[in-house]
């Protein structure tokens, strides 16, 4: 259990423990003021032998542990826990390029995405604000952030496959929508953004009260737009918005174009998994691969769980006070039992 303290300076009270231990050792070793006459020292040694000497240490040890627990309680310890968020802002970015018509994900990539997003919205807490952007050759905001989840769901009906895939522009626009929804960043938030780690960047802070994130779904490579994908990711990181990416589709995905008999065209449309993985890594999000409708729904389910929980702290002072009381009672009881025994 990881602990932190509201009043860490109060841990200085732990210095009482070694002082009490030193006092007890001195008390045990002090010379007796009275001489004891005993006619048979061999019998005395056999009765009060070294094997019973540990008994006199039980009560003091329990008492010292009680002092330690009480001193820790004085510092008001807190333990790390996971708590449920009451509010958050989520921007859904959904690819509406022509490749979303591929049917390697049944019944099609686009229809599978609509079903998964509908389930995702149904499970979100009512106070969550959700917005939606869609992108093909350019980026469109189809639903501004709102707590009206039904309005966002109905916006799915307006997703029409078009030509082009502007991944970089879409990442930047979705992150900007999220940032605008939660307000400007504080100086503390700006100072918290440093270099990304070797494997994953720390999730940027998105504001003092309401977190925000982008859920970015795409099924292809960039073919349009002004910003390159990683440039869009860099902008999202500057804004402090984590981008969670989903690569939809398989390497076998194709688009069939009609023509004269024997001249039909089949264009491969595999997802750009590596780029989406790097976007998530750079912004502090998480990457998912969704080669099937089931995997896509599982990805959105996991994202829902991630967004609805956050690290928090729970004060554990009462636990240490209870422990101190139990140890003190045990020390008292042990003292009474040992003192009642005749060696």
Image (spheres, grey):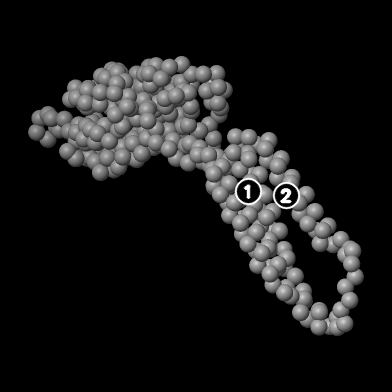
Provide residue 272's location: percent of width, then percent of height: 35, 34
Residue at 52 percent of width and 23 percent of height: 189
Whole-Å distance between the Cαs marked 2 and 1?
10 Å
Element at label 2: helix
Badge number at residue 17: 2
Badge number at residue 69: 1
Badge number at residue 188: none
Element at label 1: helix
Q: Residue furthest left?
A: 261
Q: For mark 2, does the 10 Å Cα neighbourhood hold few (<14), some (14 to 19), or many (20 or more) residues?
A: some
Provide residue 123's location: percent of width, then percent of height: 27, 36
Residue at 31 percent of width and 32 percent of height: 125
In which quadrant of the rendered view does residue 138 lie? top left
Provide residue 34's location: percent of width, then percent of height: 89, 67
Regarding residue 175, the answer to whether it shows in the image is yes
Q: Is residue 94 left or right of residue 234?
A: left
Question: Residue 16 or 171: which is nearer the viewer?
Answer: 16
In which quadrant of the rendered view does residue 107 lie? top left
In which quadrant of the rendered view does residue 76 lie? top right
Regarding residue 268, the answer to whether it shows in the image is no
Provide residue 87's location: percent of width, then percent of height: 37, 28
């Amino acid at each position: 259990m990881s602990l932190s303290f509201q009043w860490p300076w109060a841990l200085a009270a732990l210095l009482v423990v070694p002082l009490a231990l030193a006092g007890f050792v001195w008390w045990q070793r002090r010379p007796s003021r009275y001489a004891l006459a005993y006619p048979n020292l061999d019998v005395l040694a056999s009765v009060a032998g070294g094997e019973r000497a540990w008994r006199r240490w039980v009560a003091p040890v329990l008492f010292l542990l009680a002092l330690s627990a009480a001193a820790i309680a004085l510092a008001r310890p807190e333990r790390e826990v996971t708590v449920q968020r009451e509010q958050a802002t989520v921007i859904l970015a959904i690819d509406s390029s022509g490749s979303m018509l591929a049917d390697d994900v049944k019944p099609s990539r686009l229809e599978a995405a609509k079903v998964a997003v509908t389930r995702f919205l149904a499970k979100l807490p009512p106070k969550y604000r959700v917005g939606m952007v869609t992108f093909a050759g350019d980026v469109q905001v189809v639903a501004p952030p709102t707590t009206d989840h039904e309005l966002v769901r109905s916006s799915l009906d307006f997703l029409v496959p078009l030509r082009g895939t502007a991944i970089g522009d879409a990442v930047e626009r979705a992150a900007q929508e999220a940032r605008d929804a939660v307000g400007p960043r504080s100086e503390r938030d700006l100072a918290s953004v440093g270099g990304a780690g070797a494997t994953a960047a720390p999730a940027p802070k998105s504001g003092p009260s309401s977190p925000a994130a982008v859920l970015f779904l795409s099924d292809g490579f960039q073919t349009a737009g002004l910003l390159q994908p990683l440039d869009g990711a860099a902008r999202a990181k500057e804004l402090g918005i984590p981008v969670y990416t989903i690569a939809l589709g398989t390497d076998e995905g194709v688009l069939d174009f009609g023509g004269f008999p024997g001249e039909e065209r089949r264009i491969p449309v595999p997802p750009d998994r590596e780029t989406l993985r790097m976007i998530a890594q750079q912004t502090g999000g998480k990457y998912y691969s969704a080669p099937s409708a089931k995997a896509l729904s599982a990805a959105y389910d996991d994202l829902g769980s991630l967004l609805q929980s956050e690290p928090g702290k729970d004060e554990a002072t009462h636990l240490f006070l209870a422990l101190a009381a139990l140890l003190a009672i045990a020390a008292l009881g042990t003292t009474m039992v040992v003192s009642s025994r005749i060696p």
